[in-house]
Amino acid sequence: TASAEDARDYALDLLEMTEDQDEFDVEGIGISDTNRDWLKDNIIFPATGYSSPPESWPPPGPGWVRVVDTFQDFADTICEKFQIIVEPTGACCDPATGNCEDLTEAECLVPLQWNEGESCAQFVCDQPDCFTDGDCDDTNPCTTNACVEGTCVYTPVTDVTSCDDGLYCTDPDTCTSGVCGGPARDCSAAGDQCNVGVCDEDADACVKQPANEGQACDDGNACNT
């Protein structure tokens, strides 16, 4: 059994050899059996110290996928015969078409399940929901945002943490179970004998609203009765 490091180096070497078809497509007809055998005998195995593929490879770790490349014929051989696994730094297979396409490392971060005997067409490199914590910003001041293995995870902050829900007419605002909010703003200071103070969200202010129509009041002027 080869070590995980051996398997990784072996597969990466294989990927590197297939990045440029012209480099070994001496017949100009794609990757023929002759070219493939020549590659294995003269480049791939000698470079890794193996005269043939090891009988077994170590189980893949989290996030590992089978080695593939842009040339479907060669990719099938790698996936189905050699059973090589590699960290997702090169390519993945499209299950809809069975074609293998080069993808960026960021696009291959989601862990995939590896099963012996399955073909390339049964593997998919899904687009993750996120690559960094910043991709998960939900604009909610009452949650912390984290990107965990391509999935956004939102965790409520401590209750009573100060926040701003964007509404003037709630005050003070605090977090409760991941939600920002607060009680109605006290606008009583805006009232008087003939008005009540009310909150006007559109004006972002406490305003007077007429009240007590017909009720007695005192304007402080003894000359008025």
Image (cartoon, rainbow, N blue to C red):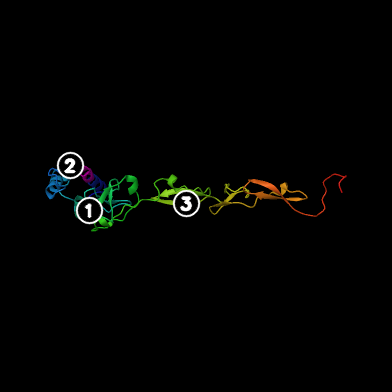
Residue 57 as seen in the image, left or right of residue 198: left
Q: Which mark is residue 79?
A: 1
Dot 3 or dot 2, earlier in sequence? 2
Name which residue type carries label 3.
Answer: Tyr
Q: Is residue 224 magenta?
A: no
- Residue lying at the far top of the rendered structure: 23
Residue depicted at 13% across the width and 50% down the height: 33
- Closer-to-camera residue (169/47): 169
Find out whether the residues at labels 1 and 2 contact each other: C-beta distance under 8 Å.
no
- For label 1, the SS is helix
* Inter-mark Cα distance, 3 to 1: 37 Å
| Residue 171 on image: x %, y % | 63, 49
SS majority, magenta: helix
Residue 73 as seen in the image, left or right of residue 215: left
Region of the chain picked out in magenta, as a range? 13-23
Residue 60 as seen in the image, left or right of residue 163: left
Q: Which mark is residue 22?
A: 2
Q: Nearer the viewer, mark 3 or mark 2?
A: 2
Residue depicted at 72% across the width and 47% down the height: 190
* Inter-mark Cα distance, 3 to 2: 48 Å
Dot 3 or dot 1, earlier in sequence? 1
Q: Residues within 10 Å of mark 3 (few under 14, many from 20)?
A: some
Residue 20 as seen in the image, left or right of residue 208: left
Dot 1 or dot 2, earlier in sequence? 2
Q: Is residue 21 magenta?
A: yes
The residue that disc 3 covers is 154
Q: Residues within 10 Å of mark 1 (few under 14, many from 20)?
A: many
| Residue 77 on image: x %, y % | 19, 53
- For label 3, the SS is strand
